[in-house]
Image (tube, rainbow, N blue to C red):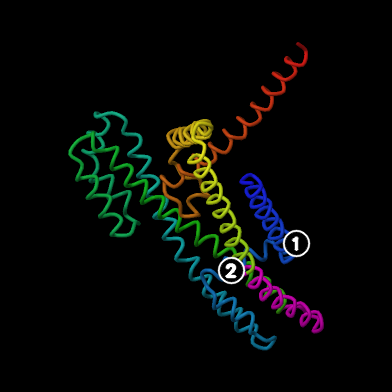
Amino acid sequence: MKNRIINIVIFAVAILACIVAIVFSFFSFDADKKDNYIQAQEVKAQSPQMVADFETATLETLPTVIEKYQKETQDRKENLKSVQMEKDILYTYLQDLKNLDSEEKFEAYKANFPARSEALFVKCAPETKKKCVDGFNGMKSFKDLEKYVETVNEDYSAVKQAYLVENSYIKSANSLIGRADGINTTASASKKAADFETFQSDLKSFGKSASLQNFFILLTYCLLLGAAALMVFFLVANMVTNFKTSYKILLGLVLLIVVFFIGYAVGTPTLSPSAIKAGMTGSGYKMVNAAVFTVYSCLFGAILAIIVSLIMNAVKNRN
């Protein structure tokens, strides 16, 4: 009876997940407009007013809207140059520190640091320069270098992340503005009106698609958490009622935890460009590495178990 209940619950969750997947694919936006969708959502995340202005614009007001946001995007592009400069300076400084792999090199660099810092941080923000200089001068010995390098690396990652996010936004904004500008400069009045109507319709449908995607993603997480909760519940219930046959499950869970910690230990804290853009920390990135390592280990383990099982069955049948 208990196994029947478990099977019914699992079947119900699976059916619900399939329904969610089918409905999600049905309401999904046109795949051919994927790039436009991503750009519009990226712009809306940072500048919702721009998307709103294009949605409510008319053919008469469109040139004014285009000019407004062309200027705004150009200003942001100019400001981004200072962020890029600071990013490049911190990168160079970080490489300087990483090359100090002996106490002799550290002492030599420290002796020349006043001159080096003046030349290196000349175009850097004053607060960044002060933080770097004070941090370096605060080191008492070569032993303090490793911890200081971690601090500088975190500062560099934060600046790089800000640069990547802003640079990506500017590209998306320019693409959106460029599409509108292309419509505005169309010679044919009828084509201009038709293209502009399609443009505004796309922006509105993108907003609806984003809301639907958020809903289905939330629903998927709820299903995942619900399935995990049911799995834990039935596992605990089975252990309580029949502990002697549950030790294999416990051993499997312990092994899974061990594999996860191994993946975390061997995972690199060095962020990839996509991880930096996503705003991940070194420890968070190691958690992702551990999760991926665990998934692949389970996959290969399952494949290996199938192969071993097939071989053992073949041997038994031959005998």
The residue closer to the viewer here, 61 or 299, is 299
Q: Residue at x 57, y 38 (%)?
A: 295
Q: Is residue 30 left or right of residue 279?
A: right
Which one is earlier in the sequence, the residue at label 2 or at label 1? 1
Q: Residue at x 75, y 18 (%)?
A: 314
Q: Amino acid at mark 2?
A: Ala
Q: Tag 2: Cα neighbours inside 10 Å, few (<14), some, or many (≥20)?
A: many
Q: Is residue 170 above or below residue 9?
A: below
Q: Amino acid at mark 1?
A: Asp
Q: Tag 1: Cα neighbours inside 10 Å, few (<14), some, or many (≥20)?
A: few
Per the image, the residue denoted by label 1 is 32
Q: Is residue 37 above or below residue 281?
A: below
The label nearer to you, 2 versus 1, is 1
Magenta part, dominant SS: helix
Q: Is residue 72 above or below residue 253?
A: below
Q: Is residue 149 left or right of residue 261?
A: left
Q: Quadrant of residue 221?
A: bottom right
Q: Is residue 28 above or below residue 290?
A: below
Q: Quadrant of residue 84?
A: bottom left
Question: Helix, strand, or loop for circle 1?
Answer: helix
Using the numbered discs, state the Cα–Cα distance from disc 2 to disc 1 in whole angstroms.
19 Å
Residues drawn in magenta: 185-211
| Image spot of residue 316 (x, y percent) | 73, 15
